[in-house]
Amino acid sequence: MQVIERWGVFEAALHGKTEGNPFTDYEISGTFTSSKETVRVTGFYDGDDIYKVRFMPSFTGEYRYEISGSFSDEVFTGEFTACEASGNNHGPVRVANTYHFAYEDGTPYYSVGTTCYVWDLQPEEVHQKTLEELRKGYFNKMRFCVFPKHYIHNFRDPISFPFEGTPMDSSWLNEENFQTDIDLSDNDWDFTRLNPEHFRNVERCIVELMELGIEADLIVMHPYDRWGFSHMDRAADDLYWKYVLARFSCFRNIWWSLANEYDLLCDKTLEDWEHYADLILTYDPYHHLRSIHNCHAFYDFTRPWITHCSMQRQDLYRHVEYTNDYRIRYGKPVVWDELAYEGDIDQGWGNITGEELIRRFWEGSLRGGYCGHGETYTVPDDILWWSHGGELHGESPARIRFLHGILCQTPGIGLKEVPGEFDELVSVAELAPAEDYRIYYYGFGRPSFRKFSMPEGISYKVEVIDTWDMTVTDAGIHTGTFRIPLPAKQYMAIRLTRV
């Protein structure tokens, strides 16, 4: 009997009918039953007369399945065993303690994400360089798209397209004329026939991230398009959405992002977005995390289908400083997926320093939110991490990894902001008494010392954290009123842990 891990993927690949259009003319579904759950999943056509059904068991034990549909005149049955998870398999990430995250097995999850919009559609050399960087453990979430992207620094055609057909000639596009009105009729797509090869490219990346313990925050729609994918009608959208959900829902590391910058998709209405959300609720039986990302106006994150806030800053200067306000307003985890990127391009969203990005990470994290990285340095081959992946050139990734190590030392699950002096940010553990664990962050301030007056009778281990040089220095055990020397430099923090 076949054995797979809990939260792994069981796959049945079956021959079926191919007359007509297999993507629209036939259906396939499977029902999986154990002593603890019964789950019905939708399958998909994978080309070459093969139909597939995939399933992620949420429990250990014996499972039986039955697969049927118009794709075949047969009914297929079988069984397999789900064993205990191993290694970095902790199950899907869920919302925990209202404002935070944990894996399904209870392990806390502190999101330190990055964005590589179309790394899944790059040549193999770039792909392998991206994986080499990811193996260094800088990030545990990556945002990327199913559709290819048309924008500055993004004029090469991808390695594949999501539908059968022929793209427009793009050889004339460059940085100066990319905003010229493009005649979408120069593309020739059959929106009733998906291209399985394209989805295999996306799928490969999801699996590679899963093996590295990285969440795949999959952007299903976006406005940066010269091929017409952002202008499809409802029928084409539904076919595409159902295929994506049938194919990818089984992977434990999936997060659903309905769109990147949904408010720039001029053809889509609020009713459309709510319709796509309904599709997720219908066709994802595993209840993966769900959100939608803005350019200007936030979506209404109070909507019940939204599990967490996926935010882009709305103000040039103040954004992560509002983290606690948004936690209170929406009652959900706040994830700053776009804070501006470390880089040097001519766009204000892509030329902040590594120091400023790290400051924003610490500010957002200590206020009880989660932050995302991006990098947009001009390089000779025009392969920018933010879109293509490839190589990292900035100073922030190692410091994000350092911050993640600090976050993982939080008692319980999650941090929250509490009142402090006007020139400091004070954070405590959400699930521990406020006096047990405290981090004081001074950002761009440069104090040479700080005084503390703590409750008598409580002893604290005091540590000085240099968030830029990535050091933690033991400052001894203290009680009552005490003074901690600091090096009069920016980006310092002091941590107090009750002994």
Image (tube, rainbow, N blue to C red):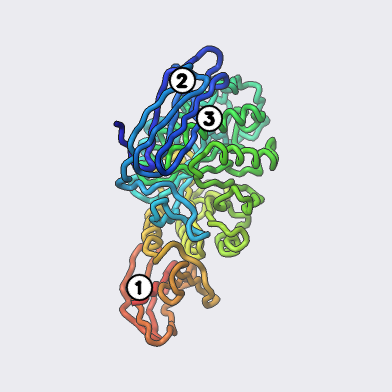
User: Circle 3 sits in a helix, a strand or a loop, which is it?
Assistant: helix
What is the C-alpha distance between the residues marked 1 and 3? 51 Å
What is the C-alpha distance between the residues marked 1 and 2? 58 Å
* Amino acid at pointer 2: Gly
The answer to whether 226 is drawn above or below residue 392 in the figure is above
- For marks 1 and 2 on the same chain, the one whose residue lies earlier in the sequence: 2
Q: Residue at x 62, y 52 (%)?
A: 301
Q: Can residue 296 be spotted in the picture?
A: yes
Residue linked to disc 2: 47
Q: Where is residue 260 drawn, in percent x and y? A: 58, 43
* Amino acid at pointer 3: Tyr
User: Circle 1 sits in a helix, a strand or a loop, which is it?
Assistant: strand
User: Circle 2 sits in a helix, a strand or a loop, which is it?
Assistant: loop
The numbered disc on residue 243 is 3
Q: Nearer the viewer, residue 93 or 29?
A: 29
Q: Residue at x 51, y 23 (%)?
A: 69
Residue linked to disc 1: 463
Q: Residue at x 55, y 35 (%)?
A: 149
* Amino acid at pointer 1: Glu
The answer to whether 341 is drawn above or below residue 16 in the figure is below
* Cβ–Cβ under 8 Å for marks 2 and 3: no
Looking at the image, is mark 1 or mark 2 nearer the viewer?
A: 2
- For marks 1 and 3 on the same chain, the one whose residue lies earlier in the sequence: 3
Q: Where is residue 456 drawn, in percent x and y? A: 40, 87
What is the C-alpha distance between the residues marked 2 and 3? 13 Å
Judged left or right of residue 251, residue 235 is: right
Q: Residue at x 37, y 28 (%)?
A: 78
